[in-house]
Amino acid sequence: MLFLSFFQTKPLAIILSRVKILPEKWYFTSVPDLDELSKEIAMDMCPCGSQTKYEDCCGPLIKNERQAATAEELMRSRYSAYAMKEIDYLRSSLHPDHRSDFNQETTRAWAERSEWHKLEILAAAGGGPDDTEGTVEFIATFTDNGTRHEHHELSSFKKESGIWHLVDGKVLPPKQVVRAEPKTGRNAPCPCGSGRKFKKCCGSTS
């Protein structure tokens, strides 16, 4: 059973589809394209960044096969809905009080012309299985009309009758880059090890 389940994985299924079995010998009918193989594997993964297959992650939520257990799970599924152009789900996952302002045509046009790169969850407060309210701070990275954007937002969620909905979102300033080490003084020795002053070495181009 372990042998069979191992060979039922998609990467191996693609490879084995190009294998011809003759008595006591196996032959490749064509050499697998590793780039093509990587693309097919990536297409199966959920856009939300969970490193899980879409069909086991956000897919069932978007298809209304189950409800989100947490506010973060709903947040992830909404990002995936943008990436997968599932506009109906974006509307239904909004709180009923806020659906009147939702423009499906505009949202669809934006989602379809954008390239969705990644979702980064920065923090979550409340929003657990036993909560009725919660917030999720995130950064969604995407490219729209050739320009790359990092959308930083704090979203609020509410659970009513066992169902989580997005209530609203507050746009936050860009995430600040924190230096791991103190900034090198211009008259200090250059950290590259050259023995020269920083301002006369690596600092001369900074």
Image (cartoon, grey):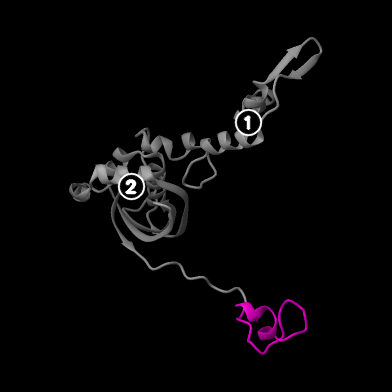
Q: Residue at x 76, y 18 (%)?
A: 27
Dividing the picture into quadrants, the one containing residue 184 is: bottom right
Residue 129 covered by magenta stretch: no
Image height of 120 relative to 186, above or below: above
Asked whether residue 36 appears in the rendered view, the answer is: yes
Principal secondary structure, stretch drawn in magenta: loop
Image height of 8 relative to 35, above or below: above
Q: Determine the secondary structure under disc 1.
A: helix
* Image quadrant occupied by the C terminus: bottom right
Q: Residue at x 64, y 81 (%)?
A: 204
State which mark lies toward you, 1 or 2: 2
Q: Determine the secondary structure under disc 2.
A: helix
| Residue 116 in picture, x, y percent from top left | 44, 48
**Residue furthest toward the right?**
24
Label 2: few (<14), some (14–19) or many (≥20) C-alpha neighbours in 10 Å: some
Asked whether residue 162 appears in the rendered view, the answer is: no
| Residue 1 in picture, x, y percent from top left | 66, 22
User: Which residue in the structure is indicated by mark 2?
Assistant: 110
The three-letter amino acid code for the residue at tag 2 is: Trp
Q: Return the residue nearer the eye: 16 or 56.
A: 16
Label 1: few (<14), some (14–19) or many (≥20) C-alpha neighbours in 10 Å: some
User: CB under 8 Å between callouts 1 and 2?
Assistant: no
| Residue 83 in picture, x, y percent from top left | 41, 43
Indicate which disc residue 11 carries.
Answer: 1
Looking at the image, tell me whether mark 1 or mark 2 is earlier in sequence order: 1
Magenta region, residue range: 182-206
Q: Using residue 64 as the reference point, say whether residue 175 is left or right of it.
A: right
Q: Return the residue nearer the eye: 172 or 142.
A: 142
Q: Return the residue nearer the eye: 138 or 188.
A: 188
Dividing the picture into quadrants, the one containing residue 152 is: bottom left
Residue 183 covered by magenta stretch: yes
Image height of 203 relative to 51, above or below: below
